[in-house]
Amino acid sequence: MPENPIAVVPVAGVGTRLRPHTHTQPKVLLQVAGKPILAHILDDLPRLGISRAVLIVGHMGERIVEFVRSRYRYPTLEAEFVEQPERLGLGHAVSLAEPFADDRPMLIILGDTIFEADLGSVLRGGTSSIGVKPVKDPQRFGIVETNGQGRVVRMVEKPDRPSSNLAITGVYYFTHGKPLFDALRELREKNVRTRGEFQLTDAMQLLVERGETITTFPIDGWYDCGKTETLLETNRVLLEKHSATADLPGSLVCGPVSVAEGAVVEACIIGPHVSIAAGARLRHAVVRNSIINPNARVENVLLEGSVVGDSAIVMGRFKRVNVGDSSELSIT
Ligand code: UTP
């Protein structure tokens, strides 16, 4: 088994597609299925024998530093932070990890990607490898072409005419950091950008052109958290997977749900597919398929497909009706 890899987790993005939540929170700290997106990624690293991670921070980076330091203050994971002062692209973000990663084996995981894959085999495999998944709409993704024996022959970022349906999911393993950092440096020195940014895909394409062997490995579950709809979908899938439930005396629970310790739920109907974070208070509400972030307050409402931000307040009221026999009334 080679030297233990270092994890590189870029989390400097602004998260425009998740506004308004990302006006006040870094995307990766938004809750999904009972914990912040980033915790789903970092919690898994010690199991893989990874004890060091470099996080590339930018937009509201201090919140991320604070979260990681408080959650991982016991030595299961040693975290380093590097600031990406300007959002120049994923390739640029990864290049900033060079002083820590150097030529060590390196596992890069995008901070907004929750996934399932047999990473143990990948790390033992001795080849650089990219996590891929077949998709129906490859023009939205970076894609890889392989030679039929699993070796990557070409990679293109968001091609207009895709020649393969294998999407790059955001999990990459490199047996040696140096060739990748050299390729990233070359892109920066020659100012080679795609769609205005220094792309990790372009650097990997350079490696392939130079004869480096890069293979692919299958990503079984790929849970995107980039938009409200996909965040809610990921919440649904992960809650189902873990059959999460809660005991809420005085309320009715239709699982799966995740209710953090320290959340207060009174006289509600909760679920299915609801995550309620610590400090949230819900009274007389019916909530399904929703994420309630820490310290939010929800009262007298019916919520469906909703994300309620940290410390936000959502209040409704009960309606009075006086409806005669055989009438039809629709309350919207
Ligand atoms: P995205 O392309 O999803 O960007 O980045 P984003 O800012 O997070 O979200 P949108 O597109 O504005 O809604 C994928 C991952 O790469 C990181 C992001 O933090 C995210 O985890 N990234 C991207 C960086 O760290 N730096 C960059 O310059 C670009």
Image (cartoon, helix red, strand yellow):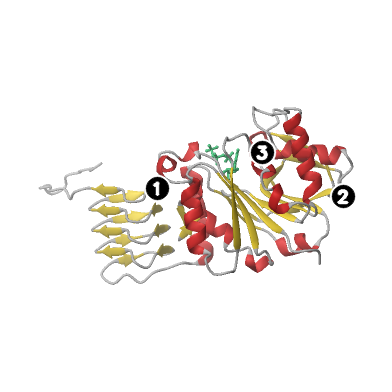
- At 81% from the left and 45% from the top, the residue drawn is 179
Image mark for residue 92 = 3
Q: Position of residue 259 (x, y in %)?
A: 38, 64
- Residue position for label 1: 305
Q: Are marks 1 and 2 in contact (CB under 8 Å)?
A: no
Earlier in the chain: of badge 1 and badge 3, it is 3
Q: Position of residue 22 (x, y in %)?
A: 44, 42
Q: Nearer the viewer, residue 205 or 62?
A: 62
Q: Amino acid at mark 3?
A: His
Earlier in the chain: of badge 1 and badge 2, it is 2
- At 20% from the left and 43% from the top, the residue drawn is 329
The span from disc 3 to disc 2 (Cα, nearest Å) is 31 Å
Q: Amino acid at mark 1?
A: Gly
Q: Is mark 3 within 8 Å of ligand 1?
A: yes
Q: Are marks 1 and 3 in contact (CB under 8 Å)?
A: no
SS under mark 1: loop
SS under mark 2: loop
- Residue position for label 2: 149
